[in-house]
Amino acid sequence: MQDRLFWLHVKKSAGQSTRNVLAPHYREVDRSAQLANFIQSPVEDYNDLLNTYLTPLGPHQLRRILFAKNPLYPDDF
């Protein structure tokens, strides 16, 4: 299995700088157009979609790590 990186952005804690440092390993989605959802996106984009506050997560809106653990990466977390 390929090693993958999971990073959870905490607001007001150097998010852009961290993204720049992780750039070779962290894939960013295009936020200039309408933001895609998880079903429309490849698995490689899930981490950045999760870190985008514009992505609605319903009851997990303020519990993004639980959304990552259960629906997104149940076997890899």
Image: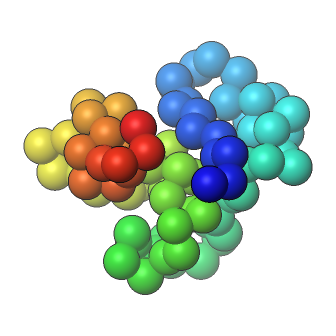
> Is residue 63 placed above or below 45 in the rendered structure?
above
Which of these two is toward me, 62 or 77? 77
Which of these two is toward me, 70 or 47? 70
> Is residue 75 placed above or below 9 in the rendered structure?
below
Quadrant where the N terminus is found in the figure: bottom right
Of all residues shown, which one is farthest toward the bottom? 40
Q: Residue at x 20, y 41 (%)?
A: 60
Q: Where is residue 33 drawn, in percent x and y?
A: 59, 77
Q: Quadrant of residue 44?
A: bottom right
The answer to whether one can see residue 40 in this image is yes
Q: Residue at x 63, y 17 (%)?
A: 13
Quadrant where the C terminus is found in the figure: top left
> Is residue 56 placed above or below 41 in the rendered structure?
above
Quick check: 65 left or right of 24?
left
Q: How many marks?
A: 0
Q: Where is residue 76 drawn, in percent x and y?
A: 43, 45
The answer to whether one can see residue 61 in this image is no
Of all residues shown, which one is farthest toward the top? 13
Of all residues shown, which one is farthest toward the left? 59
Which of these two is toward me, 18 or 53? 18
Q: Where is residue 16 drawn, in percent x and y?
A: 74, 35
Q: Where is residue 47 drawn, in percent x and y?
A: 53, 50
